Image (spheres, grey):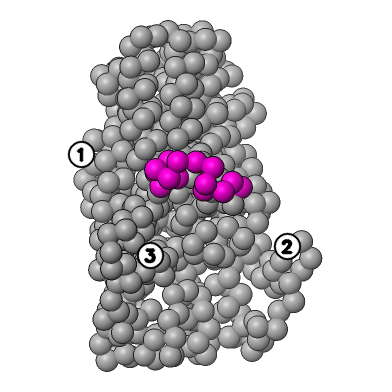
Amino acid sequence: MHPAPESHDPRLWNEDLAPVPPERRTWTTWNVAALWVGMAVCIPTYMLAAGLIQQGMNWSQAILVILLGNLIVLVPMTLNAHPGTKYGIPFPVLLRASFGPWGSNIPALMRGTVACGWFGIQTWVGGTAIYATSAVMLGFDPAQRVPLPVLGIAAGEFACFLIFWAVNVYFIFRGMDSIKWLEALSAPFLLLVGLLLVWWAWTAADGFGPIFSQPSRLGTDAAFWPVFGAGLTAMVGYWATLSLNIPDFSRYARSQRDQVVGQAVGLPATMTLYSFVGIIVTSATVVIFGEALWDPVKLIARFGNPFISALALLTLAVATLSTNIAANVVSPANDFSNLNPGRISFRTGGLITAFIGILMFPWKLYEDPSGYIFVWLIGYSALLGPIAGIMISDYFLIRRRTLDVPQLYQPQGAYHYTRGFSLVGFAALFLSILPNLPGFLVQVNLAPAENFPAWLVAGYHYAWFVGFALAFLLYSVLRKLFPNR
């Protein structure tokens, strides 16, 4: 990065948050597409259809929901990427235009906290792969494990979790350049492994297996649409995080064409393909093992072959690592850095993310597929959807894609608003989250459904869409009425 101009306040600037100069914007269409292949190919994606099928959908309905959700989230993804590519600025700096220089920290931390949870989940997934493979290679029985007090998992599981955590921390120290080459190298490897899994399932089960002939259990509109709505919102919520902080990556793209085409090629196709791979392989396990094994870690344990287990471990580790570093470290590292740029660098922010990821007990977030979709994915989408609506309204409708970049680094500049906070931004954010609160309280059993109108509780199934639309409209109107508030 270049040194800060004198007009930049050190409380709002460091080298990691500074605009990327043109000579460093080197990411091609392939780099952007490879980024998405690396992020999308992971165990949660592989298992994504499982929750939908368990809720009563057949395989084709589940795949349709996954594809549709990713096509929808591609729209805010490419729109929010535009200012990153045009101006070279990261997500928390872009937030200053709509929330103020100090106010930007609140939505940035909302996004960063979700990323900490995801970092923990992905690290736990990688750790369980190491643990399961160790059991096969060393010959111990995981079923005999003794959970530790408080943690609720065995000492060996926690040790494997920390080992994989340490590998992630290594890449945090290496910075953005290591992420670029990690994604570019892992993408073709992961796609090849996916095709090999399909070939194995087809030959071992002599076809695609019984899941493909399983009918939908949602035979009526009243049964189907709530599950469809919740599933679609969960699929959008899956990448609602990245649809906000995509400027953290698009700031390195050579052109708008590179970021748009790269994302359009890499995101929907990879998510749908790998979810389909999960269905194919799981369907084959019903024939081969007599039960549906959605979790690839448990499938590895059934192989009983140390060589195959070691190869599978490598694949799972690469897939989980490439997802975790890009999707769950870059954003919170910048978000925490935005709190105090003079003292918190990208690396320090990444370390904060890593430690919070442990403290969130991610194995508890991940253990229940129903809670994973209805509480975790939809719950945070209710928070992040409104932020996306505000960002897109501010940049495209209010400012017509024009930002005064030096002023974004000035506390008393054009984006000062009210003592560094945008009252309009926070009013739109709060009012857009509010309608989804009753459904969330019902979902987590903090309030009975009878306390609220049925339509308000049902609306929670569409939390991201409700929040996004409300925030976009409210911010557009309020900012016109109060341009300096």
Structural crowding at the residue carrying mark 3, measured as other residues with C-alpha within 10 Å and reported as few (<14), some (14–19) or many (≥20): many
Secondary structure state at the residue bearing disc 1: helix
- Which residue position is annotated with label 3? 52
Secondary structure state at the residue bearing disc 2: loop
Q: Residue 459 is drawn in which quadrant?
A: top left
- Which residue position is annotated with label 2? 151
Viewer-closest of 31 and 448: 448
| Residue 478 makes an appearance in the image | yes
Going by the numbered disc 2, the residue's amino acid type is Leu
- Expressed as whole percent of the image width and height from the top left, the position of residue 172 reads 55, 48
| Residue 176 makes an appearance in the image | no
- Expressed as whole percent of the image width and height from the top left, the position of residue 68 reads 26, 53
Q: Residue at x 62, y 32 (%)?
A: 344
The quadrant the C terminus occupies is top left
Nearest to N terminus: mark 2 or mark 3: 3
Of circles 2 and 3, which is in front? 3
Structural crowding at the residue carrying mark 1, measured as other residues with C-alpha within 10 Å and reported as few (<14), some (14–19) or many (≥20): some
The tag on residue 243 is none
- Expressed as whole percent of the image width and height from the top left, the position of residue 133 reads 56, 79
